[in-house]
Image: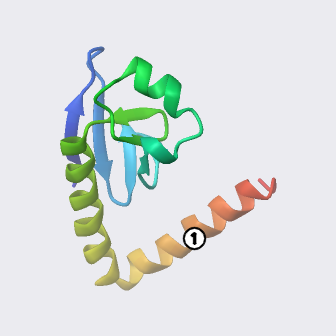
Amino acid sequence: MPTLIRTTTEGRRIEVIGLAICLDGKLEAYELMPVIDHPNRIAIQKAVPDATHMAGRLALTAEEAEAVRVALENAETQVLADPGAINERFRLAQQRRARAEGIE
């Protein structure tokens, strides 16, 4: 069940769907990155001064990042209780690793 984090000014939905952070239902990221650790932090801080975290190309405030964190924790708890979901998580991790290694 998707968890709505916010709607962008263009009307697109930022949601947590399962273990993914999505924009209009399309994958953006699997985890949050603090802006302070982001390689483009200066540009991010200029463009979105109240952003504390990034999820892919999505800048999030502290409140939004906390909502994402809670939704991801809840999804992970559900995944750990379902053997089929555990297999799917391993499958997705293998796909991400293959993509990172240039094998698609």
Q: Amino acid at mark 1?
A: Arg
Among the 4 quarters of the image, the one containing residue 82: bottom left
Q: Looking at the image, which residue is at 38% across and 33% down?
A: 59
4 shown above or below 96: above
Q: Is residue 4 in view from this perspective?
A: no
54 shown above or below 49: below
Q: Looking at the image, which residue is at 33% across and 59% down?
A: 18
In the image, 47: left or right of 97? Answer: left
43 shown above or below 79: above
Q: Nearer the viewer, residue 40 or 93?
A: 40
Q: Looking at the image, which residue is at 51% across and 27% down?
A: 42
Q: Looking at the image, which residue is at 73% across and 61% down?
A: 98
Q: Indicate how the structure is coloured in the image.
A: rainbow
Among the 4 quarters of the image, the one containing residue 8: top left
Question: What percent of the width, then of the height, locates residue 80?
Answer: 33, 82
Q: How many marks?
A: 1
Q: Is residue 66 in view from this perspective?
A: yes
Quadrant (top left, top right, bottom left, bottom right) of the N terminus:
bottom left
Label 1 belongs to which residue? 91
Label 1: element kind: helix
In the image, 98: left or right of 5? Answer: right
Among the 4 quarters of the image, the one containing residue 40: top right
14 shown above or below 1: above
Residue projecting furthest to the right: 102
Question: What percent of the width, then of the height, locates residue 47?
Answer: 41, 18
Badge 1 crowding class, 10 Å Cα cut-off, few under 14, some 14 to 19, many 20 or more, is few
Q: Nearer the viewer, residue 38 or 5?
A: 38
